[in-house]
Image (spheres, grey):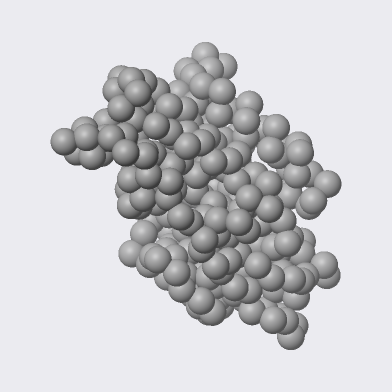
């Protein structure tokens, strides 16, 4: 297995879509990208726009086949509701499901540490217990310790020099409720193409209900917006958290129908 560093690559997005690289061809790639709509370009623009801030992408290969990806950035520019200094923040780590537990995640973490050891005092990550996405147990096995918790997320750190632990940003979300309307606040960030797609799905689902549903589109790419709310991604319906993960169109339809009833 080999790990290579990129500034931008479509293979990162394809991995997140569970694309079948074993039968890779141009037409299949285009069909996969069609699922994302404009979110494909939104993500790639974010990659280019944050290049000067230090974002980098690692791709693990078995032969010529991509099997996993890790994206990292200095924590000062993290697209998540965290704060800290002198740490490298792991935005996401994803290994193709059928190739998990074969060392790809470990190799990606090892490469990330090697590439950032001279510039930072440690690594930080938002991870989740009992989850296949960014599992807290995996990071604990690799020397990370939990330094803070919020909602269902663990903020974890692995330090090789003395450094202040990172913190979660305080949440300042106050929903705007409109009489006789169902309000949907969708927080999304261009770093994650699945959230960029979810934002479009929210807009499309709301159209079916006309003016009965009001959508507040809150993009958190700007650090000031992220600090203002203390939320990076999520869907809130009538002020209540409905989704902390990118919902499918079907899930959105059910949630809106339940709120309207």
Residue in the foreground of this view, choosing between 53 and 234: 234
Which residue is situated farthest in the bottom direction here? Answer: 162
Residue 142 in sight in this render: no
In this picture, residue 192 sits left or right of residue 236: right
Picture quadrant where residue 50 is located: top right
Q: Quadrant of the C terminus?
A: top left
Picture quadrant where residue 257 is located: top left
The image shows residue 158, relative to residue 171, as above or below, that is below
Residue in the foreground of this view, choosing between 5 and 237: 237
Residue in the foreground of this view, choosing between 225 and 150: 225
The image shows residue 228, relative to residue 43, as above or below, that is below
The image shows residue 26, relative to residue 237, as above or below, that is above
In this picture, residue 200 sits left or right of residue 219: left
How far across and down, in percent of the image, does residue 204 sit? 39, 23
Which residue is situated farthest in the top direction here? Answer: 27
Residue in the foreground of this view, choosing between 213 and 98: 213
How far across and down, in percent of the image, does residue 118 sit? 83, 70
Q: Residue at x 33, y 45 (%)?
A: 238
Q: Residue at x 74, y 71 (%)?
A: 85
Residue 167 in sight in this render: yes
Q: Say how many tags the image has.
A: 0
Q: Residue at x 55, y 56 (%)?
A: 229
How far across and down, in percent of the image, does residue 236 sit? 38, 47
How far across and down, in percent of the image, does residue 228 sit? 61, 56
Which residue is situated farthest in the left direction here? Answer: 261
In this picture, residue 175 sits left or right of residue 163: left
Picture quadrant where residue 43 is located: top right
Q: Residue at x 45, y 41 (%)?
A: 186
């Amino acid at each position: 297995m080999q790990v290579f560093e990129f500034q931008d690559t479509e293979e990162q997005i394809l991995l997140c879509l569970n694309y079948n690289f074993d039968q890779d061809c141009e037409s299949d790639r285009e069909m996969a990208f069609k699922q994302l709509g404009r979110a494909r370009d939104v993500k790639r623009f974010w990659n280019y726009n944050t290049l000067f801030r230090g974002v980098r992408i690692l791709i693990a290969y078995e032969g010529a086949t991509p099997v996993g990806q890790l994206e990292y950035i200095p924590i000062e520019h993290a697209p998540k509701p965290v704060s800290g200094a002198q740490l490298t923040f792991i935005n996401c780590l994803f290994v193709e499901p059928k190739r998990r537990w074969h060392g790809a995640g470990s190799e990606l973490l090892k490469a990330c540490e090697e590439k950032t050891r001279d510039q930072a005092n440690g690594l930080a990550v938002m991870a989740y217990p009992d989850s296949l996405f960014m599992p807290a147990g995996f990071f604990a096995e690799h020397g990370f310790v939990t330094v803070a918790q919020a909602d269902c997320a663990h903020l974890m750190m692995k330090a090789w020099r003395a450094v202040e632990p990172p913190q979660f940003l305080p949440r300042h979300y106050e929903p705007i409720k409109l009489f006789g309307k169902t309000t949907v606040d969708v927080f999304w960030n261009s770093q994650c193409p699945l959230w960029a797609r979810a934002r479009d799905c929210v807009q499309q689902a709301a159209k079916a209900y006309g003016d009965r549903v009001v959508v507040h589109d809150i993009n958190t790419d700007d650090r000031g917006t992220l600090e203002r709310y203390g939320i990076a991604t999520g869907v809130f319906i009538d002020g209540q958290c409905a989704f902390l993960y990118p919902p499918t169109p079907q899930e959105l339809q059910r949630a809106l129908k339940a709120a309207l009833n």
